[in-house]
Image (spheres, rainbow, N blue to C red):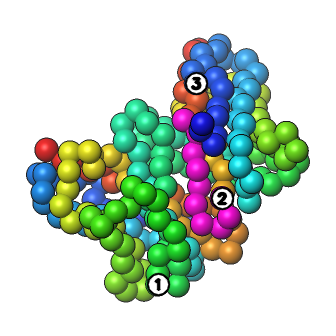
């Protein structure tokens, strides 16, 4: 069983739509990370959270520690948001365990 | 803004050859990591490094792999005798006291 599960695996939406990507995990974590990976391959950290909610521009991340669940929301989506979004959990202080990623495509 | 850098961006090597992938972490960071991503698969942890020694390694990180911090700035991953299945994107990451990790742009390793 994967320690980190994301859904959906693929998501296509129209520009302006509200996007939600979900992440569930099965292990004790030190923190949860949302990352963005563009076609060139580079990984950019969007959020790190261990409780509650964080907001950065049009992106919002929430986590429910009791439910072992996190969501990433994108408001007013734009074609430039098209990327792979990855949920990763920190195990202790030493490593990240990654989900398989959600490929998001926003059509104009 | 400080960033993690990696060289080369793309390395092509023949099976059985040794490769060294290089990373320059953010200068005041103390924790260093290598991850890899085989094409079409998820990112996997390889090894973490702190205080000049390996803190944790995955089962992927067998005797063919080694890491080193040869000076105050570089952090290297060596694969002694590459196999076809070592073809992947290799990411270096570093962090300071916060748990947030900063990733380099990756090195694409192609083993032929």
Q: Vertically, is B63 above or below A43? A: below
Closer to the camera: disc 1 or disc 2?
2
Q: Tell me the element at label 3.
A: loop
The label on residue A9 is: 3
Q: In this rendering, would A42 be left or right of A63?
A: left
Marked residue chain, label 3: A
Q: Position of residue A76 (x, y in %)?
A: 74, 24
The label on residue A89 is: none
Specify start and end residues of the magenta stretch as a single range: A91-100
Residue A70: tell me if it is visible: yes
Q: Vertically, is A21 above or below B101? A: above
Q: Is residue A61 magenta?
A: no
**In-front residue for pair A85/A92:** A92
Marked residue chain, label 1: B
Q: Position of residue A71 (x, y in %)?
A: 76, 35
Q: In this rendering, would B52 be left or right of A72?
A: left
Crowd around label 1: few <14 · some 14–19 · many ≥20 (10 Å): few
Q: Which image quadrant is residue A79 in?
A: top right
- Give the residue displayed 33% in from the left and 71% down from the top: B66
The label on residue B52 is: 1
**In-front residue for pair B102/B88:** B88
């Amino acid at each position: 069983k994967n320690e980190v599960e994301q859904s959906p695996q693929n998501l296509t939406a129209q520009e302006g739509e509200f996007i939600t990507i979900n992440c569930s995990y099965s292990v004790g974590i030190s923190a949860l990370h949302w990352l963005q990976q563009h076609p060139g391959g580079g990984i950019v950290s969007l959020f790190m959270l261990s409780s509650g909610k964080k907001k950065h521009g049009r992106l919002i991340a929430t986590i429910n520690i009791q439910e072992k669940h996190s969501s990433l929301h994108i408001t007013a989506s734009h074609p430039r948001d098209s990327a792979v979004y990855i949920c990763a959990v920190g195990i202790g202080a030493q490593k990240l365990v990654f989900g398989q990623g959600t490929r998001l495509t926003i059509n104009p | 803004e400080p960033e993690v850098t990696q060289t080369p961006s793309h390395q092509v090597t023949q099976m059985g050859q040794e490769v060294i992938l290089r990373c320059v972490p953010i200068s005041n960071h103390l924790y260093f990591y290598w991850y890899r991503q085989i094409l079409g698969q998820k990112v996997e942890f390889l090894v973490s490094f702190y205080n000049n020694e390996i803190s944790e390694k995955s089962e992927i990180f067998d005797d063919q792999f080694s890491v080193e911090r040869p000076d105050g700035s570089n952090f290297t991953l060596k694969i002694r005798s590459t196999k076809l299945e070592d073809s992947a994107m290799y990411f270096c990451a570093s962090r300071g006291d916060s748990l947030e990790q900063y990733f380099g742009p990756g090195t694409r390793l192609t083993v032929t």
